[in-house]
Image: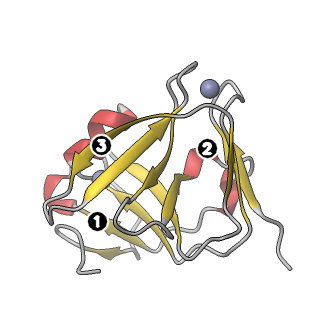
Amino acid sequence: MEAPFTGGCACGALRYAMTGQPVEQTHCQCRDCQRRSGSGHSSWLVFAETPGAVVSGPASAWSVLAETGMEKRHAFCPICGTPVYLAFPAMPGIIAVTAASLDDPGRFAPRQVTWTRAAQAWDSLPPGLTAYAQMPPA
Ligand SMILES: [Zn+2]
Ligand SMILES: [Zn+2]
């Protein structure tokens, strides 16, 4: 069995461990991800059906509605402010963690990029990724 995907915030107070494999790994260039990351995109590993997802430590959260109307809850460390994971109240089995929050960010293997429509000219990503102008249909 592969080692769990573990990681957390910059100060170490908020931690997670995922025992499953990511079902998707993606860069997202939407404006929300730009604002939240302070750069051109955010990078995500999406886990589904994860009874093995363990989150420990304090988490604050804020919600945003996707264009589909689905609520997305962004969890961050209340101490250092690092965005760590994204949850979906309508789909409790799914959790997405940021690639750079992994203890070993080298395990991130992006396959796609979403929201290229909102990309900044200075944020170029490597070729070979499947590109979507917005969010692909779920
Ligand atoms: Zn922290
Ligand atoms: Zn995004």
Horizontal side, residue 72 vs residue 75: left or right = left
Contact (Cβ within 8 Å) of mark 2 with mark 3: no
Q: What element carries label 1?
A: strand
Q: Where is residue 75 in the image (x, y as percent from the top left)?
A: 46, 40
* Label 3 CB-ligand 2 distance < 8 A: no
**Circle 2 crowding by C-alpha within 10 Å: few under 14, some 14–19, many from 20:** many
* Residue 121 appears anywhere in the view: no
> Badge 2 is on which residue?
101
Residue 81 in view in this figure = yes
Q: Which mark is residue 114?
A: 1
The residue closer to the viewer here, 17 or 30, is: 17
Disc 2/disc 3 C-alpha distance (Å): 20 Å
Q: Residue at x 66, y 40 (%)?
A: 8
Image quarter of the C terminus? bottom left
- Give the image's coloring scheme: secondary structure
In the rendered view, would you say 98 is above or below 83?
below
